[in-house]
Image (spheres, rainbow, N blue to C red):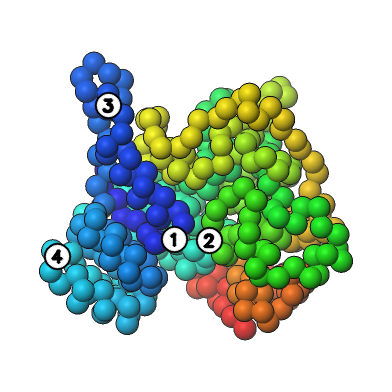
Amino acid sequence: MTLSLLGSTGSIGRQALAVCEALRTSGPDRGREGTHFLPFEPGIAVLAAGRNTPLLEEQARRFLPELVCVADAEAGRALKSSLADTPVKVLCGAESILEAAVFPGADTVLNALSGISGLRPTLAALDSGKRLLLANKESLVCGGGLVTNAAKRGIIPVDSEHSAIFQCLQGGRREEVSRVILTASGGPFRDFSKEQLRSVTPEMALKHPTWRMGPKVTVDSATLLNKGLEIIEAIHLFSLRPEQTDVVLHPESIIHSMVEYTDGAVIAQLAPPDMRLPIQYALTYPARLPGPAAKLGFTARSTLTFEEPDRGRFPCLALAERAARRGGNMGAALCGAGEAAVTAFLRGECGFTEIAERVERALDDAPYIENPSVEDVLQTVNLYRW
Ligand code: MG
């Protein structure tokens, strides 16, 4: 497998490189004749990132990809001169990320870009026939049918809940699925009152109790907008009707999601909260190989708890469910407004509870388009670049 890694300096990108390195070196039996492990040698053909040049340079020197792409043109030019002593080719500018997505020397694209910027690279990778490992949920939430129609070979999910569902779906036939149940940690403010939520600061929101992630998804986890986006992501990935999705709070983050079948049997996927596991499963699918993720200790943690999410205190979840039922370009409106509101919150320009208010206004006001084109989707998203 040769990989083009989009978003290599972000949380998922860094962990994906760690998994690739571990897969190359771990497991003394790997590839040896007479063992059931297939040789797995992930090659890194492309690294792409927004900016963060010092880390990107370190990654480029370590993995020596054929191509490095930097969205920020100035940062890209600086990287080009600092990598002049290596054979690595550097492209810069926003469009270079699309080059990374279609690079002929890679057969697989892992899209770990943050936010709506991931949509066009997702479509480009699928159009060029790449195997797509998708960590960028906004691609599916905004693009919906545009993305699934372009995906002739299917999309392998990296998001932990969707990886879990993908694994649980191997327990039965698609027509036997009654619903999928996404688990949510509930974020750091699960027990906060409405009053307390009003005084949440960016610093408080950026501390997640169980997962270490980038700032956008960490804030989205705190508002439960992330879970709402994940409902829409699941609907598109697994061809579900909105009423076949459900969310349950599960603060321990051990069960990563579940599938309920028509006979009432529920298949769950359990593991410690460690993104390296879903990343590795996507990379090696359909094989399972020894990897760096920790094993689950059942005696150390014997209690798993569940509760109903409170949509009154966390209205972003209900708003996303409304967008999911309405379909069309409402996913794009949700993403666009959500991204703009979180940016404003992190800059100190709006309060924590105002994020939901802004998203609600966006869903009320966005002109509805039933079957949006890529241009319609991007136009809907851009309505909220305030
Ligand atoms: Mg997730």
Q: Which of 119 and 77 is in front in this view?
A: 77
Q: Nearer the viewer, residue 61 or 113?
A: 61
Instruction: Answer above or below: position of 310 versus 347.
Output: above
Q: Nearer the viewer, mark 3 or mark 1?
A: 3
Q: Quickly name the residue at label 1.
A: 10
Pointer 3 and pointer 2: residues touching (CB < 8 Å)? no
**Side (left or right) of 55 relative to 137:** left
How far, Cα to Cα, is label 4 from label 2?
Answer: 30 Å
**Side (left or right) of 26 relative to 327:** left
For marks 4 and 1 on the same chain, the one whose residue lies earlier in the sequence:
1
How far, Cα to Cα, is label 3 from label 2?
Answer: 33 Å
Residue at disc 4, secondary structure: loop
Q: Quickly name the residue at label 2.
A: 214
Q: Quickly name the residue at label 3.
A: 28
In the image, what residue type sits under mark 4? Thr
Q: Classify the position of the N terminus by image quarter.
A: top left
For marks 4 and 2 on the same chain, the one whose residue lies earlier in the sequence:
4
Q: Quickly name the residue at label 4.
A: 86
